[in-house]
Structures are given as structure tokens and as C-alpha cells.
Image (cartoon, rainbow, N blue to C red):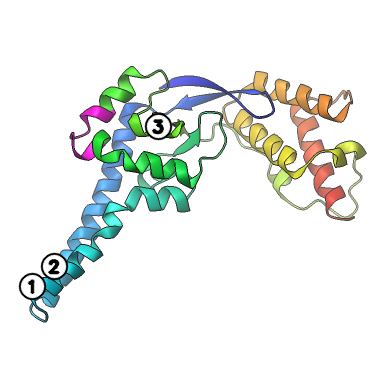
Amino acid sequence: MSNTNVNTAQNVNINYNVSSLGHRIVALLIDLVIMGLYQTIINYIGLGFESMVNDNTFFGVSQFLLLPIAFYSLFFNIVFGGRTPGKFIMKMKVVKIDGSPARWSDYLVSWLLRPIDIWFTSGSVGIMSIIFTEKKQRLGDSASDTIVIDARKKTKISHTILEDVDEHYEPTFLMVNNLSDNDVNEIKEIYRLAAESRDFKALNQLRDKVEELLHIKSELRDGIFIRTVLKDYTYLTQGH
């Protein structure tokens, strides 16, 4: 498994673990098993349905029922934010090169190139592309400007930054109101990624950037400072 550095919108470098070829193959095999089970069920249902209609109707219905297989990866990536069931089990996720969430159009581009990467070439094109590209991207990944990362959590993250703060909470940094919702969402995501990968350099860069945005200097440790900023913003924007 290799690493890649990406630069977020807040100019903070995050170190990602890029999913290995082996992990991606296992995730694909899991998805193939699920698709195979679905097709087996459809074929079994079709045995009882075939005798009830003419050949043309049966063919049309059977092809329609197989559409979920054709759109399998596109559907799950859009609905579950860059994860198919196989990727979910293997704890992998599709994101943009800059670390931001991929969009539905990115998943569409990647899906359109799957026949070349996988189906028409028995996976050879996709495998060679992953092996010989710096960020281990198949053609679909390169065209959509995405990468597949290892999303396994390596550290526990305090859930307090995602919860409502107590009504008696006293904010420390009143100037957090100068931040926008987009700023706070970006800070929260960078904090999460830095904590998961134990990237203390990225956490320190994030702290410096937030201090710059707020025009302050704090003696709090990096992680505590970021959590305090997030809790302050939550408290002040909830109208307490």
C-alpha cells in the first residue's frame, strides 16, 4: 500500500493511504459475488415466469431485471458516497485527488470506462493502469480525477465535535462567527482525516491555518484547539 499527499482547499497537506491493487481486486470479487447472487435469484424467478408469457416478453423483462447489474457500481457509489458493498467491506472509498468528496459526475465518468478497464479486457487494462500510475489509478479514476483510499480508522476520534454542545457551554473563541459553514465543514473533515492517519504534521498545518483565519494565537494543543473551535462554532450558530 502506498501513500499520496493531497492539498485541501485550506492549503493543508493530508497523507492518504492509497488502496492497493490486492485490496481493490478483493473488493471487486465481493461485488461480483453479490451481482452473481442477484442474477441467480433472477434466473430462478424467471424459470416460473417463462412459461406464462411469450418469448419476446420474457426476453424484455429478463433484460430489464438485469439492469441493476449494469448500473451496480454507479448506483452504489452515488448513494453511498464512493463505496460499493465490496469497498465498504474492505473499508475503501473513492475521493477526489484533493481529498474532497467525489461528485455523481465523477462516478459516471469512472463507470463509463469500466468496460475498457475491466469487462472487455478481463481487467488487464485496469490492473496495468493501477500498477504503473503514481496514485494507483485505473483509466476511470484518472479520467474522473479520483483515487481510491484506505478508509480504515487508525485512531478513535472524539464524537463531541459532531454533537450538540450543552446549553451551559461557554465558548472560548467568539470570532469563530467569521467562519463560513464551508470553512467549518472543511476543518472538520481535515481534522477527521488527519486523526485517522495520525498525521500530526497535517493537524499542525490545519491549526496554523485556522489561527490565521481567526487572527488569533492560542496556547491549546493542536487537537484540543480544533475541537474547541468546532464546538464554539456549533454553540454560537445554534442561537444560544
Residue 62 appears in which quarter of the rendering? bottom left
Count neighbours of disc 1 (C-alpha within 10 A) and say few if under 14, some if 14 to 19, many if 20 or more.
Answer: few
- Magenta segment includes 91: no
What is the x, y in percent for residue 15? 56, 22
| Dot placed on the residue nearer the N-terminal end, 1 or 3 | 1
Q: Residue at x 10, y 75 (%)?
A: 50
Q: Nearer the viewer, residue 100 or 174?
A: 100
Label disc, if present, on residue 59 of the rendered structure: 2
Percent coordinates x, y for residue 75 in the rendering: 39, 53
Packing grade of label 3 (10 A; few <14, some 14-19, many >=20) is few
Instruction: Find disc 3 in the rendering and name its residue.
Output: 143
In the rendered image, the residue lying farthest to the bottom is 52
**Residue 151 visible (yes or no):** no
Specify the quadrant of the image occupied by residue 211: top right
Start-end of magenta stretch: 118-126
Contact? badges 1 and 2 (CB < 8 Å): yes
Amino acid marked by disc 1: Asp
Q: Is residue 137 left or right of residue 206?
A: left
